[in-house]
Amino acid sequence: MPAFTATAPAKIILFGEHAVVYGQPAIAVPVSKVQTRVMVSATPLAKPGEVRLQSPLVGLDTTLPQLDPAHPLAKTIAALLEHLKIARLPACSIRISSNIPVAAGMGSGAAVTVAMLRALSAFLGHPLADETVSALAFEVEKVHHGTPSGIDNTVITYRRGVYFVKGQPIQFLTTPRAFTILIADTGTPSPTSITVGEVRKAWQTEPARYENIFERIGQIVHQARKSIENGAIKPLGRLMDENHSQLQELGVSSPKLDQLVEVARRNGALGAKLSGGGRGGNLIALVESDQEELAASALREAGAVNVIATQVGI
């Protein structure tokens, strides 16, 4: 029996993180230069129902019964089996590989879930529609983030840029003109669930103040969508700067993020901001093609552990 393989890209939020949890819009796009791959192979010589899971990146090599039922991988398998009304998996091995940075706001958890759902459902002879993959992945995202926005599973499942409002139908972005962003990793892991939880506590303490910030971020996102869909790229830089300022007000930036944002701006970027949960993880910078290498080199020299250039709209 052949192996079944599926891949899923990373994602990056261009505008609207944190506020999206509170009903404001956000814009996010896939990043195909980094991805997760899941391969499922039948193991007919193993005991019936024996499932081995391997992920060398995180040192995981275990069987399904040994995995905590609350683990995202166990939750993914359970959600799929429940959806398909299958009691258990046939004997198989599941191997996960990924070059998506973990705890960096790039959807590494959702990418694993999406790729696993696709590979396993194909292995079982019941490939899933995108809508089902996204819905099941959203349920698993609750393990990662507590109160997920739904952005990660949506962008990663459909592999398209989206204008996203929680609870509303997906709106895919129209990008008549491609543009380049740099994604710079601070090297500081920052699980999104922690910063999302801290923002929620702060909002509960001062709801009026935080809702004003969320509304301002929502206005920025709306302007950014108009610029992207009109092919007006330069204004996005100013909007990134404004969005970063609001995220600073939320308390989710960090000295390292602020330093690298300033480095990008001083070295040719049209604008820059943190992306994702904050306190670490990634920042993004909008650059024109003739400034890409200058800005990327400056970010590396300033301490970014990795810089990825990706095209939005291609």
Image (cartoon, rainbow, N blue to C red):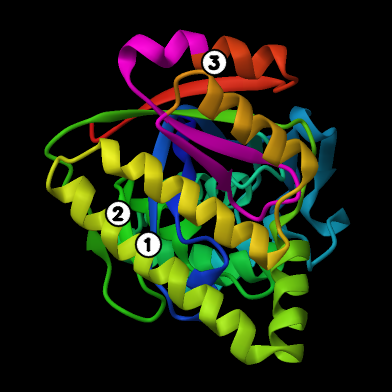
> Which residue is under mark 2?
224
Marks 3,1: beta carbons within 8 A: no
Q: Position of residue 302 (x, y in %)?
A: 72, 18
> Which residue is under mark 1?
220
Residue type beneath disc 3:
Ala
- Mark 2–mark 1 distance (CA, rounded to whole Å): 6 Å
Highlighted magenta segment, given as a residue range: 270-294
- Left or right of residue 35, residue 167 in this image: left
**Res 277 → quadrant:** bottom right
> Residue at point 31% right, 79% down?
168
> Residue at point 71% right, 33% down?
259
> Residue at point 44% right, 47% down?
240
- Mark 3–mark 2 distance (CA, rounded to whole Å): 23 Å
Which of 140/183 is in front?
Answer: 183
Q: Quadrant of the C terminus?
A: top left
Marks 2,1: beta carbons within 8 A: yes
Residue type beneath disc 2:
Ala
- Left or right of residue 240, residue 80 in this image: right
The verdict on residue 258 being magenta is no
Q: Secondary structure at mark 3?
A: helix
> Which residue is under mark 3?
296
Q: Is residue 159 visible?
A: yes
- Left or right of residue 108, residue 62 in this image: right
Q: Position of residue 83 (x, y in %)?
A: 47, 73
Q: Nearer the viewer, mark 3 or mark 1?
A: 1
Which of 65/7 is in front?
Answer: 7
